[in-house]
Structure formats: C-alpha cells, structure tokens
Image (cartoon, grey):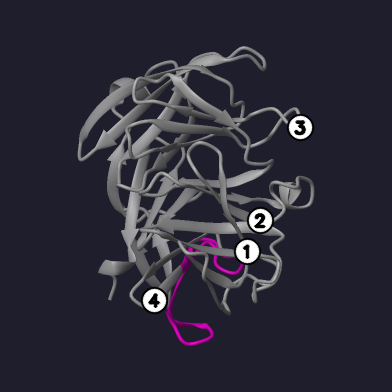
Amino acid sequence: MHITPLVPYARLPRARSGARQEILHSTVDAFGRAHWLLAGRRRNGGPYDATVVTVDDGRFEETRLSAVTAQYPALDALPDGGFVVADCRRPRGDDDHVQVFDALGRTSWTFTVGDAIQHLLADESGDLWVGYFDEGVFGDPLSYAGVRRWSATGEPKWELPASTPGGRMADCYALNAHQGEAWVCYMEGFPLVRIRRDGTVRVWASPVRGTAATVVHDGRVAYFASYDHRDGLVLCTLSETAAVPYLLSTLVHSDGSPIGRQRRLARGSRLYVQAEPYTAWEMWDLAAAA
C-alpha cells in the first residue's frame, strides 16, 4: 500500500492551547491563514464572548468577538479582516443564526442561511458557500438545494438546481471552494460536481462512495476518507465523464502515525487535516504530488 505523509502547517500557540478555553471550531481560510475559535465557560443558550486566534506563517494575532450566539459554531474569515460565525443548527425556526463580525470583533450583520450546516466556506471574494446535511435538505426550505452560495450580508446568490445531471442532493459530503468555483460530492450517487461562479455546472461520475473531502488540480482529483478507505486517498484523472483512479494511498501524520479521528478541509489542491486535540493543522497538496 502506498503511504502519503501530511506535512505540518499551523499550530495554535502553546499559550493559547494551554488556557482554560474550549476550541469551538477551527478552519483554514481562502488565503491560507489558520484560525481557532476559543471560548471559556458558556452559559446555557446565552450569548458569550469568544476569541479568534489567527496563525499566518508562524505569526499570530487575536480578535475578540462580542456576544456570539452560535451554540454549534462554524467559523471562517472574510477578506476585509472580519469573521463569519454560523450556528450549524437553526434552533428556533426563523431566528438569525449567522453573525458577521468586523475586524474589531463587532457584529455588523445577522441573517439566516438554513438549518443543518455541514460546510461553511468563505471564498476570496467574501461569498459564503454552504453545504447542508440531510436534516436540512429534507427539513428546511433554505437548505433544500443541498449547497448554496450567499453574500456576506445574507443575500442568496446561487443554489444547486434540482435538474443537475448528478441528481438531487440528499447530503453534502464534501465541499471545496477556491478561486471563484466550488466542487461538491454528495449523496445520492456521489457524483463530482464543479460549480463555476457564473452558475455553470459540470458533473463527473465518481469511483468512491461517501468521501469526506475532495481536492482538485489541473485535471486531477483526490478523494479522502471514503466508505471503502477510511484514511485513504484515491487519486484520479478527470476524463470527459468520470474520475478515473490511478493511485490508492493511505494518508498518515507527518511522523508516520495513523490519523485517527480528525477534521478535514479542502481548498483548491490542498487538503488540511486536524486531528484531536485539534490544536494543529497538517496539509497535503495534490499540486505537489507525482
């Protein structure tokens, strides 16, 4: 079996990882900066103050966010220096569950994007790509399409049409947003779908089921963590109609150890992996792979 090691990418500073604060979420933004959302003890259901720790090329800075409402938060950074925090569950129907904070940590917008957020990715322009899991797709009109693009002020800009050749989405398993386009892989059938900024959609048949992340580069795609290969990378070339496998590899930590339980994030050709206790990101780049 071929082995592919990750490489270290970004680490939460020791002074912050040792503090008595919970890591609520972590991400790598469209510009390659790593972020951690930290908070102390939270009151049941009430707003709380939080801190975003940003690590960029070894340097770090902190942004204090006031009156965060998300109980199951997803975080991303915006190009203007602000942040978006969404509650992955919309707890009381029509309540706004997405907050946009300015660079000083003050709330500037609130809105709703639908229940059951599986993925939240801000692109280089500040648009928000949101993928939903099945409870939203089958339970909330805003989540019905399975994947949507919103402005950073909550205006709907695009949704996956029901007439997509890949079929209707039941659950958005993988979402990759980078440089004006997005790639998704979803149940049923797990087609690979490319979405251009103008809304143009193209579909390829996939050789894997249940992938957790897809990365793309120059006519190639890599699937990570499918039903059949838990820590496996399936590298493929894209023909006219299908992703054709040419290499199966097992992804491991930079020290060679098994990955185990982890979070995954796809940005263009880069796959970011964060294992417990979620204080560090490692990376693998399809663009650098043979």
Q: Which mark is residue 93?
A: 3
In the image, residue 244 lies in the stretch drawn in magenta: yes
Q: Amino acid at mark 4?
A: Arg
| Region of the chain picked out in magenta, as a range | 223-246
Q: Which mark is first along the chain, 1 or 4?
A: 1
Q: Nearer the viewer, residue 34 or 273?
A: 34
Q: Estimate the spatial distance between the alpha carbons at disc 1 and disc 3, rounded to whole Å.
A: 25 Å
| Place of residue 262 in the rendered image (x, y in percent of width and height, measured from the top left) | 49, 47
Residue 28: quarter of image: top left
> Does 237 appear above or below 58?
below
Callout 2 touching callout 1 (CB < 8 Å): yes
Q: Amino acid at mark 1?
A: Tyr
> Does 111 appear above or below 268?
above
Residue at the bottom extreme, as displayed: 240
Nearest-to-viewer mark from 3 and 4: 3
290 to the left or right of 206: left
How crowded is the residue under tag 4: few (<14 C-alpha within 10 Å), some, or many (20+)? some
Residue visible at 64% across and 29% down in the picture? 96
In the image, residue 18 lies in the stretch drawn in magenta: no
199 to the left or right of 77: right
Q: Amino acid at mark 3?
A: Gly
Residue visible at 35% across and 22% down in the picture? 63
**Residue position marked by numbered label 2 in the rendering:** 146
Badge 3 marks a residue whose secondary structure is loop
Residue visible at 37% across and 30% down in the picture? 82
Residue visible at 57% across and 65% down in the picture? 185
Q: Which mark is residue 220?
A: 4
Whether residue 50 can be seen here? yes
| Place of residue 69 in the rendered image (x, y in percent of width and height, measured from the top left) | 58, 21
